[in-house]
Amino acid sequence: MTCREGTLGLCEMPLSLKTLLAEPGRTLDRQLALFALLSLGILDWLSSGLVSGTHALRIFFNAENCLFVRQRLRDKTADRIMSHGVQLPDLFDALPREEAHREFQHELATMRSLCLKLLEEKQAAA
């Protein structure tokens, strides 16, 4: 699956969390909140079919971003979001189509819940 017309090629460009989040003076709580918002956007793209799990892996849930989350953000919830995202394409390789689709939707719901939890935690800390 490729990007739909009119998306300005945004879903073809890898999103570097290091570039997007590591702005001087930005607190860790702010970085985590922004990470959660970016993740929710990617999840929306996935649920709407704008990008596939494979595309999401390439543009967001890639090794560079996983390392950034683990080494710089050092938050278990953020790390779980990335771990779930990395596994999305494998569902369609490992399971029959209908079962993979159900599990894909379940994983997206789990990831959304984790993003909202992260936002609530950071909002409470602010």
Image (tube, helix red, strand yellow):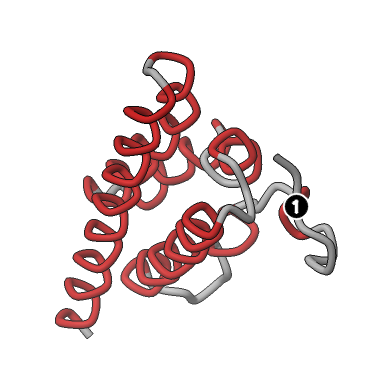
Residue 9 % position (x, y): 83, 58
Which quadrant of the figure contains the C terminus? bottom left
Give x and y (percent) for residue 119.
27, 72
Image quadrant of residue 116? Answer: bottom left
Residue 122 image point, x, y percent: 24, 74
- 93 left or right of 12? left
Extreme residue toward the bottom, this view: 126
Given residues 3 and 69, the one toward you in this image is 3
Residue 71 quadrant: top left
Between 94 and 65, the residue placed more toward the observer is 94
In the displayed structure, 45 sits above or below 59; it is below
Q: Is residue 51 left or right of residue 53?
A: right
- Residue 53: give x, y in percent of width and height: 53, 38
In the image, residue 30 above or below residue 3: below
| Kind of residue sitting beneath label 1 | Cys
Residue at position x 42%, y 67% in the image: 31
Looking at the picture, does residue 4 appear above or below residue 34?
above
Q: State which quarter of the image contains the N terminus.
A: top right
- On screen, residue 86 versus residue 50, left or right, reads left
User: In the rendered view, would you say 27 is above or below 72?
Assistant: below
Residue at image position (37%, 29%) is 100
Q: Which class describes the residues within 10 Å of circle 1: few (<14), some (14-19), or many (20+)? A: some
Q: Secondary structure at mark 1?
A: loop
Q: How many marks?
A: 1
Q: Please tell me which residue is depicted at 38% across the width and 74% down the height of the picture.
A: 30
Q: Can you name the residue that lies furthest to the top here?
A: 94
Q: Quadrant of residue 83?
A: top left
Q: Residue at x 42, y 39 (%)?
A: 85
**Residue assigned mark 1:** 3
Give the side of residue 106 with respect to residue 20, left or right: left
